[in-house]
Amino acid sequence: MEEWVRDILGKGRPLAQLGLCDHCLGRMFAKLGERLTDEQRGRMIRAALAEEGAAAEAGDICPLCENVFEMVPRFAKAVADKVNTVESDNFLVGCRIDPEQARREKEIIAEYGLEETAEPLKTELNREIGKVALPLINRAVDFKEPQVVACVDTRFADVTLDCAPLFIAGRYNKFSREIPQTKWPCRICHGKGCPRCHGTGKMYMTSVQEIIGDIALEMAGGQEHFFHGMGREDIDACMLGTGRPFVIEISQPRRRDIDLDELESRANDGILAQYRGLHFVPRSAVAMYKESDPDKTYRAKVVCEGRIDPEKVRATAAGFVDVALDQRTPQRVEHRRADLVRKRTVYWVRAENITDESFDLVLKTQSGTYIKEFVSGDEGRTVPNFSEAYGAQCRVDLLDVQEIDFRED
């Protein structure tokens, strides 16, 4: 008789007399004895009790698990049938048990002081189902970052799949001044469909997100797509240069190893936006992209009141070198942004293409700077501003983002 068995016979005897099955009896001492299953522990305890003249047979129906372990082969096949319908490198088994079983188990553990040695019924079921399912699925088990989790509802022998999202990163250029970065629900019907949106449920026909997201969703057999951009440009602004970094997220993908060259080619079939450098990334990339605040370079076509003085324009632009701005939330976005004064920096400004009607300002600024308001002053909400320094009211007619200073290591 092993020493650990001898040490726990005092607690094992009343448990065995309850009629617990070998699985449930052994699970109460799961943290004792090495390289044993809970069922093996239960048999050893029962055999030791018999040697001591205190034999106690398991009941026909276990009062704790109700013989659920007899269903493990059926559960495992159901898991395999489900998991084998999707692509993944690994999987994990979970389960949902009858709340009454969980309650009874908690009471027994508390009554007999087994908190230090017992493991939950769910834990053993997960492990036993997984062991039987493994050769039927022929994929690795991953406890930390499973791509697919098969959850067995032991009450109904029903299996549901939870597929980890697929994350694809890249950069996009937006060449249209009439589409937003992300899908924009109709303000009137909130996505339900109405006369204003012609039944589409959207404010705009398409978006940077939808152009690539709809294709990725179809290729991955997913449920929904989400767009995570490293900031965003205004609808009427173009995104040029090397593009804006983004991550497209596909929920519940049934296929993971999709051809990114094909995705890029299909997404680039139109003229509104273009995509490049697509690659798979982990979930953590979303937070990294969202939290990054790289500096940006813009080109703004500016018009102003009165006759344009080229030398004064150049001098005014040259005067903005490492200038700190106080920018109160612009009037155009105050309905959806908190009314705050934000500190931002303009690193440099250069004037180009000066004509009698307009001029271009090329400028590099800190992330989050409102360019249109820096130029116009937004009725004093941005201080200092270009209009005040120049001495005439100016406004941005066209705006392009030329570069985002971000390097993905």
Image (cartoon, rainbow, N blue to C red):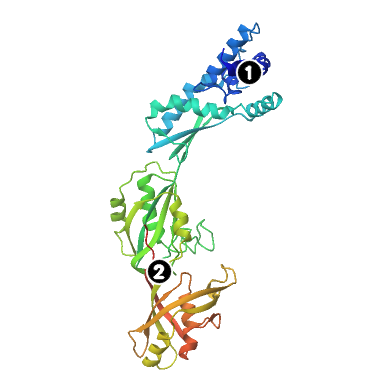
Point out the residue furthest to the front here: 3
Decide which of 107, 209 is in the foreground and name it: 107
Mark 1: give few (<14), some (14-19) or many (20+) Cα within 10 Å: few
The residue lying at 31 percent from left, 64 percent from top is 271
- Nearest to N terminus: mark 2 or mark 1: 1
Viewer-side label of 2, 1: 1
Tell me the SS state at disc 1.
Answer: helix
Residue sitting at 54 percent across and 78 percent down? 326
Which residue in the protein does label 1 denote? Answer: 7
Q: Amino acid at mark 1?
A: Asp
Residue 178: image tag: 2
Is residue 308 at all visible to an observer of this figure?
Answer: no
Please indicate whether residue 208 sits to the left or right of residue 14 in the image: left
Mark 2 crowd level (few <14, some 14–19, many ≥20, 10 Å Cα)? some
Q: How many marks?
A: 2
Q: Compared to 325, does 390 lie above or below?
A: below
Say whether marks 2 and 1 touch (CB < 8 Å).
no
Quadrant of residue 148 within the rendered picture? top left
Q: In the rendered image, which quarter contains the C terminus?
A: bottom left
Q: Quadrant of residue 112?
A: top right
